[in-house]
Image (spheres, grey):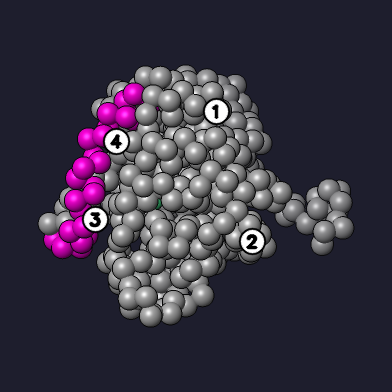
Amino acid sequence: MLMLTAACWAFLVPAAAQITAVRAGKLIDPDSGSVLTGQTILIRADKIEAVGSGVTIPPNAKIIDLSKMTVLPGLIDCHTHVASGAQDARDLDVFRKTAAQYVLESVPNARAMLESGFTTVRDVGTMRALVDVALRDAINRGDIIGPRMFVAGAYVTITGGAGAATGLAPDITLPWDMHYGEANSPWEVRQVVRKLAHDGVDHVKVLSSGAVLAHGSYPKSQEFTLEELQAAVDEASHFGLRVEAHAHSAEGIKNAIRAGVASVEHATMIDDEGIALAKQRGTYLDMDIANDECIQEQGRTGEVPKDMLEKETQLAQITFDNFRKAVAAGAKMSFGTDASVCPFGTSGKQFGFMVKYGMTPMQAIQAATSNAADLLGHSTEFGSIKPGKYADIIAVTGDPLADIRLLEDVKFVMKDGRIYKQ
Ligand SMILES: [Zn+2]
């Protein structure tokens, strides 16, 4: 198959690909930060063929009338854990299930993400290695419904660190897939990255600082060293993979930026030097700022253990303040929610927080579309509604630039030219 030329491929494409014309009342273009009116989007099979006010609709086209709605590119959540099983799978529950149960319980998560308007996710780690690869592939084959997934395969973490299965007696032996990403030197990091690349992951997730939702791991601490982070970025680059780093602590954040990661996740305690460094290096800050409420609620119901809750309480306001600072400084920002902490299907709630803490509605939309696609390295394929890109299109009633919270209630979802919600 690899030997087929482009010309040969042409014969494999069905002769009469479905043509669809979407009439868009308002169309938000995140690339230019503008709103267009009276546009028609012409879609052939899974790709956008033309967009404009003077587009001729072929007589055989299926017409979708969204002329009373605002049309946007499919949303992208750059920090999810879709492949993390059922939402009751908290804390030590992961030990009560097989990997097969874990991934099958993730099937509704994927559907909920897509139906809420997120046509693409960057899934940034799972406690059972490679179940995310299986989920991605099942979606791509059309076996199950979900967003286009870009997966990490495992957490690349120090032993006992933010991405490790912690809180257990030391004489308990973990199955292979619960410590697949553990590494404790630059060369061990390289080895793990090589394994993951071979397993077909799309990017690499490293844990640069401690975490909130992990026993015995502390957000203020540094975990991987600069040398280990540099090894991850360099080794990943050999396979064309980008690296994102979980980091709460100021030093953990700066180490990750200096090592050359594509994005810093959380970036909770980022200081002025960190913000300046991120700007200078073009590093995306992927700050999840909507899930404090969920964690506090889960603390009340006992789902989140007390030690984790205390760490969260200390950090919530710091996150809001630093998000505001980073936006004001003009750092590159993407949209990531840590979906799995809050229920799948509620990622849209973060837009309201982003606007509350300093973004314009257009900036918040750009974070989840054009910026997110740029962070993933796929700007030519999605992130805006342009000819040649995948037909990932959503719509809401009303004007989300006037009321950003309309994005919590997406009415129309198309991915790859196929309608999933109307
Ligand atoms: Zn996360």
Q: Secondary structure at mark 1?
A: loop
Q: Is mark 1 within 8 Å of ligand 1?
A: no
Residue 318, image x, y percentages: 26, 34
Q: Reading the chain from its start, which is encountered first: label 2 or label 1?
A: 2
Task: Name the foreground residue: 175 vs 76.
Answer: 175
For image coordinates 30% across by 56% down, the residue present is: 213
Relative to residue 356, is residue 148 depicted above or below?
below
Task: Name the foreground residue: 31 vs 69.
Answer: 31
Q: Measure how far apart labels 3 and 2 are at the Cα level.
A: 31 Å
Residue 38, image x, y percentages: 48, 22
Task: Name the foreground residue: 317 vs 134.
Answer: 317
Which stretch did the figure color magenta?
A: 301-326
Q: Reading the chain from its start, which is encountered first: label 1 or label 3?
A: 1
Q: Measure how far apart labels 4 and 2 are at the Cα level.
A: 34 Å
| Amino acid residing under circle 3 | Met
Residue at mark 3: 308
Looking at the rendered image, the disc whose residue lies closer to the viewer, 4 or 2, is: 2
Residue at mark 4: 319
Q: Are marks 4 and 3 in contact (CB under 8 Å)?
A: no
Q: Reading the chain from its start, which is encountered first: label 4 or label 2?
A: 2
Q: Secondary structure at mark 4?
A: helix
Left or right, 306 with respect to 25, comes to left
Residue extending furthest left?
Answer: 300
Residue at mark 2: 191
